[in-house]
Image (cartoon, helix red, strand yellow):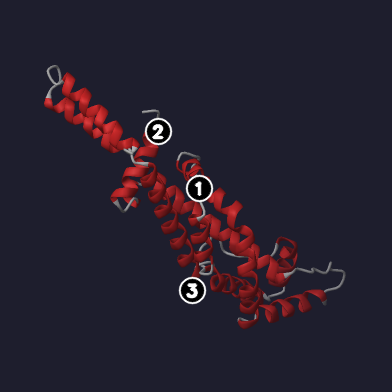
Amino acid sequence: MLSLKRLTIGIVFTGVFLLQGSCTTAQITDILKQVNSNPTTSEISMGLKEALEKGTGISAERLSLENGYLGNLDVKILFPEEAKNVENTLRSLGLGSMCDQVITSLNRAAEDAAIAAKPIFTDAIKQMSFQDVQNILLGEENAATLYFKGSTTTSLSREFSPIIDSSLKKVDATKYWSDVMTRYNRIPLVKKVDTDLTAYVTQKAIDGLFVEIAKEELKIRENVAARTSPLLKKVFGYAESQKSGK
């Protein structure tokens, strides 16, 4: 059975043949270009998945580098909100270096876990239906990011948690945190803080990952130069034409 695209091309060729007496060569060429410019469903699926695999991979790899979290103000992990008073109080007492040690160790733990996200995203991409692909391609600028939040957060949390827990101990985060809390709790009349450090860092690490994925998604949607293969150019060019109503 002929594919839809081949059938369409055949129809167009027939039309061109019948109208060739009234069409110039340039006009015929333009007609054929329009037919060939639209990607097939297979190309749309392959193109979007290629873009998503590239974007999620870059994000995970970038965050897994030393200072991937710590040196990125958009995702840097700070003291938990409920412990802001702890930090402010200790810094006012000249214990800023102790607070800095805590912050550094929290971000190191997140960096250790980040690379584990790659296979989780790869699996999610493989399981996408064509409807998922179409919704993402023609959706809002953060459609892919939202899809991954919905489909991978549970798996990411399950995978990240033991890595981060181990890393927090390895980089002495739990020790630094314990020292900070011990010092703080010695201050008269302060309200004690009880934070699950592993759960907190796991959630912040995942949040940071989605921040970076959103950046990569926006880049490939808006920056033609980020479409590094003919397939990506074709698929995202098609998406732009569909959104603009052309």
The reply to whether residue 231 is visible in this rendering is yes
Q: CA distance from mark 1 to mark 2?
A: 20 Å
Helix, strand or loop status at disc 1 = loop
Q: Amino acid at mark 2?
A: Gln
Foreground residue, 79 or 194? Answer: 194
Q: Quadrant of residue 235?
A: top left
Q: Mark 3 Cα within 10 Å, few/some/many (few <14, many 20+)? A: few
Q: Mark 1 Cα within 10 Å, few/some/many (few <14, many 20+)? A: few
Residue 211 drawn above or below residue 37: below
Disc 3 target residue: 66
Foreground residue, 145 or 62? Answer: 145
Cβ atoms under marks 1 and 2 closer than 8 Å: no
Mark 3 vs mark 1: in front = 1
The residue lying at 66 percent from left, 75 percent from top is: 165
Q: Position of residue 184 (x, y in %)?
A: 78, 74
Judged from this view, the residue extending furthest toward the top is 22
Comes first in the chain, label 1 or label 2: 1
Q: CA distance from mark 2 to mark 3?
A: 41 Å
Comes first in the chain, label 3 or label 1: 3
Helix, strand or loop status at disc 2 = helix
Disc 1 target residue: 129
Q: CA distance from mark 3 to mark 1?
A: 36 Å
Q: Quadrant of residue 96?
A: bottom right
Q: Amino acid at mark 3?
A: Glu
Cβ atoms under marks 3 and 1 closer than 8 Å: no
Q: Position of residue 73 (x, y in %)?
A: 53, 61
Q: Position of residue 15 (x, y in %)?
A: 22, 23
The residue lying at 48 percent from left, 61 percent from top is: 122
Disc 2 target residue: 242
Q: Amino acid at mark 1?
A: Ser
Helix, strand or loop status at disc 3 = loop
